[in-house]
Image (tube, grey):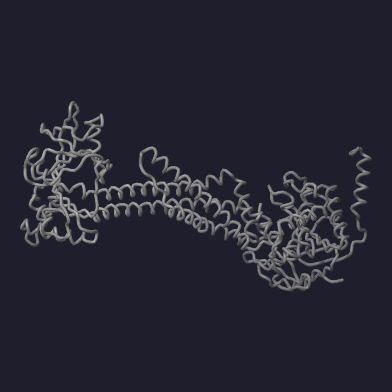
Amino acid sequence: MKIFAILRVAARALRRNKLRTILTMLGMIIGVGAVIATVSLGNGAKAQVEAQIASLGQNVILIFSGSFTRGGVRSGWNNAGTLSVDDALAIEREIPDVTVVSPEIRSGTQIAAGNQNWSTTILGEGQDYLDIRQWPLAEGSMFTALDVRREGKVAVVGKTVADQLYPDGNVVGQVLRIKSVPFIVVGELIPKGLSVMGSDQDDVVIVPYTSAMKRLFGGSNLRGITAQASSAKALSTAQEEITDLLRQRHRITPGHDDDFTVRTQEEIAEAANSASQTMRLLLAGIACVSLLVGGIGIMNIMLVSVTERTREIGIRMAVGAHGRDILMQFLTEAVALSVAGGILGIGAGVGGAKFFAWLRQWPALTPVDWICYAFLMSAMVGIFFGFYPAWKASQLDPIDALRYE
Amino acid sequence: MSSIIQLQHIDKTYHTGEVDVHAVRDVSLRIDKGEFVAIMGASGSGKSTMMNILGCLDRPTKGQYLLGGVDVSGLDRDELATIRNQKIGFVFQGFNLLSRTSARENVELPMMYIRKSTSSREQHERAMRALETVGIAQRADHHPNQLSGGQQQRVAIARALVNEPAMLLADEPTGNLDTQTSIELMGVFQKLNDQGITIVMVTHELDIASYTRRNVIMRDGKIVSDLPVGKRLLATEELNKLRQAHEAVQLVP
């Protein structure tokens, strides 16, 4: 029996009961569609997170004051007040794998320019900060080492701040008042978008950390230190060396916890990946459950179909069909059902993801390999759940089947 | 003449619960090429079992069945299916056509299961030739529910003929038809038989049996009588008589 003839018989049988066919396929459509849609959205989110991690800069090591767990008590990253400017300078000086560092102070405050005012984040940084973060300027230039040493009243502003304070677009050279202290804007940054945490990275004013300490906020403790390793390979050794150095400088005896946290860019990427790994496992679970449900629907309908068409099976056997021919015919029908459902499901999933992406301004990326998996899985579901009904049909006795009313 | 069917000491026993039912006991029968045989008997006489064995739908418990010189009593399911496909053409009481499938496609059905491949054009032509033989080629594209009972049975005969089998096996072919249509159908069978086709028919109607050439009577699973038909009816003559009778009572203009 030729495959073309089998397909024609299957197509006719499925057309005969259109509503039933569509309802049976709906199980597969919804299952496959849900999987493809969630994978697309998850993949889009993952790509976004990866881009954000890349936006941290190149070979970046982040050092925060405070530690996650200190003596069993969980404490936050920020403002533990354990890092000093000297620590930062020592890291730059004594660790060969670290090329440059930027001590960091961060505080939120109200700023004003002309008759506009805006609440934003003030970052006190070193002169190399923008190089470490690989953050180019749209206009103007970064403040210099001299500005840092002199506690210069100079600032670089992010795109959001520039838009808010200088609506006419003329930014560089303007006066910016931070806590009533006038600063001169020397540069405007190109937009960088959202951070890993979801905050607007462009809503920022960067000033020399010395100025931030002396002229704005007082104090001598750093929130953190951003360091750049000489290469990607040097990241983990640099991380260890920084840890050793800081423990030594802070006189932490062996057996006591660090009072600071050192994270490399790699570790942050891994944390994000492991989160999406969990997500992917969850999706695989949903996929299995929905395909199981769809498959059971197909099996159910195929069993009904075999019973309904007992006489047809009898006729086919009487005129010479082997058990194998009957098996192939019903198996083909089941696979046609599941594959057609799968294909429509892929379409629905891609469309649904696109729609959701458009609705919520969320990226959607459908991976091609998942489309292939979905297709293969739906074919396998058809074979697996269609086999028993088809086998049952092939085992019918032609005499009984012919007499069946 | 060469024999098409040779049954030698055939027994068929069904095991239903604790009782063994002997449906056919020690039957020997020989049917030659070109014969037109009616197997007759009341219900329970074993004629349906005989039909199933002759049609290779069932296997005898004991004995030997030679079909066209080949012993088919020991073949398995698939081998029997191949024999049915190539050597036997079935005509059933209930027509047994596939619904929502055109007459031509119904006739093409047995060719679907020929092991060696035939082109769809050749299948198409053979189906049309078979439909012409039974005089219903003009209805090739009609579906069974658009055809009368007599027309449906003609399509079924065309289906039985299409693989050029050794014999036609008809199970109460006129059971669902009225008198005139029954005679017309017997006319079709007689015409085919005149062309040399062997026909075995199971029936319980004596008048239908008298259109054949040989009557085999069964009772309690045994053949009790096997005689040539003395006063053979010819369908063409009977139809003429029927028409005259109808005209006499002005049933037809």
Image quarter of residue A250: bottom left
Residue nearer the viewer, B141 or B220: B141
Residue B81 visible in the current orientation:
no
- Above or below A15: residue A182: above
Residue nearer the viewer, B196 or B31: B196
Residue pictured at 91% horizontal, 51% vertical: B236
Quadrant into which the C terminus of chain B falls: top right
Q: Position of residue A206 (x, y in %)?
A: 17, 41
Q: Position of residue A178 (x, y in %)?
A: 13, 34
Left or right of residue A369, residue B219 in this image: right
Residue nearer the viewer, B23 or A283: A283
Left or right of residue A25, residue B208 in this image: right
Residue pictured at 21% horizontal, 61% vertical: A234
Q: Position of residue B60 (x, y in %)?
A: 71, 69
Q: Position of residue A266 (x, y in %)?
A: 25, 56
Residue B66 visible in the current orientation:
yes
Image quarter of residue B186: bottom right
- Above or below B58: residue A311: above
Residue nearer the viewer, A114 or B148: A114
Quadrant into which the N terminus of chain B falls: bottom right
Residue pictured at 6% horizontal, 40% vertical: A214
